[in-house]
Image (tube, rainbow, N blue to C red):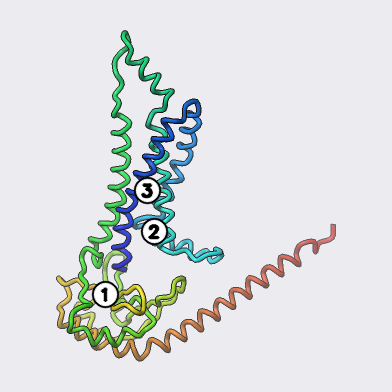
Amino acid sequence: MIRQEAAMFFGSLLLWVPLLLGAGVGRWRRKRAGDNAPSARLWAIVNLPGALVLLLACNGVMAPRTLAWFRSLGALPFAPTPGMLQGVAMFAAFVLGYSIASMMWSGPAQDASTASTNAPGTTGPVNKHSSMKVFAVICATIALSSGTGVVSQGLRKGGFLTTSDVGGFPELAQVQEQLRPLEACSITYRRRDKRGQRQHPNSVFIETCSVGEYIIVLIDVPGTWADKGVGFEMSRGSMSEPWEIQVEKAEVPFPDLEKALEHFAPLIAAQYPEKLRERRASASEMERHLDEQQRLEQERKARAKGSYPR
């Protein structure tokens, strides 16, 4: 979770690149639109809401919810990933910058109008920097809203700005060795709820490294460690990497964390492989059941067609 939040933060910063690139292309295109400037502006206005919705849905705090929604559909020809959503967000940022610039920067037709307005006898000069100011305000608003959401996630209890990685401490080398061979990339003890309160004092939650596999294995552990305030999140990118152990140093004493990990590690190493096989077998059986139900439903609908007398 911590790794995902940090990636979310830096992903939001990267959106400035396609946003400014789109603005540059939109300005260049607008200046050369000529007689087609009104149609280009209308097309930009049509694209603007869709690009904004895509950007907000695929970036920042909304990205995990959007990913979960896509995965819940179950009928997509591909498996959505966080990287795929980030790509969509970058494309939406480009379209957003292009659309805003296409609407605001003037083309040749408007340049002529500006020249006539500034001719002798007219009311006065037009502010040439007004479009740039409006564009800057819009960009700042988008950046502020996105950045505020990410930073608020990072500053919450257990967020990536309030925790530290202690996985490289030599005192935890034995824990690393015991858990390294496991087919797992996330281990969480005392998950936080929406209010930031830690829950589940008697279970460790473990997730696999397989993309698109939504299986969580629970390992029972003594709840006495919860009474000592112990809570942590372990994560890694693949089975070949060492574990990052994220902990709130201000709340969890290291001796208690060390003893809890030394207690949990052999339990996890001994029970996790078999429980993972059981969960996968159960998930496969459920998938077969759902496929069979879908097949029977399709057959029933096929029989219903044309079965009534005319």
Q: Secondary structure at mark 2?
A: helix
User: Percent position (x, y) of residue 228?
Assistant: 18, 80
Spot the residue most to the right. Answer: 310
Pick the quarter of the image with the C terminus. bottom right
Question: Within the image, what quadrant is residue 75 found in?
Answer: bottom right
Question: Within the image, what quadrant is residue 19 found in?
Answer: top left
Question: Within the image, what quadrant is residue 273 found in?
Answer: bottom left
Amino acid, disc 1:
Glu
User: Percent position (x, y) of residue 27?
Assistant: 39, 35
How far is the residue under mark 3 from the one under mark 2?
18 Å
> Which residue is under mark 3?
18
Amino acid, disc 3:
Pro
Q: Mark 1 packing: few (<14 Cα in 10 Å), some, or many (20+)?
A: many
- First in residue order: circle 1 vs circle 3: 3
> Which residue is under mark 1?
244
| Nearer the observer, 278 or 20 | 20
Q: Marks 2 and 1: which is nearer the front?
A: 1
How far is the residue under mark 1 from the one under mark 3?
31 Å
> Which residue is under mark 2?
63
Amino acid, disc 2:
Ala
Asked whether, in this view, residue 81 is left or right of residue 152, the answer is: right
Query: Is residue 221 placed above or below 17 in the rendered structure?
Result: below
Spot the residue most to the top. Answer: 121
Q: Residue at x 24, y 84 (%)?
A: 261
User: Percent position (x, y) of residue 241?
Assistant: 31, 77
Q: How many marks?
A: 3
Asked if disc 3 and disc 2 are in contact, CB closer than 8 Å, the reply is no
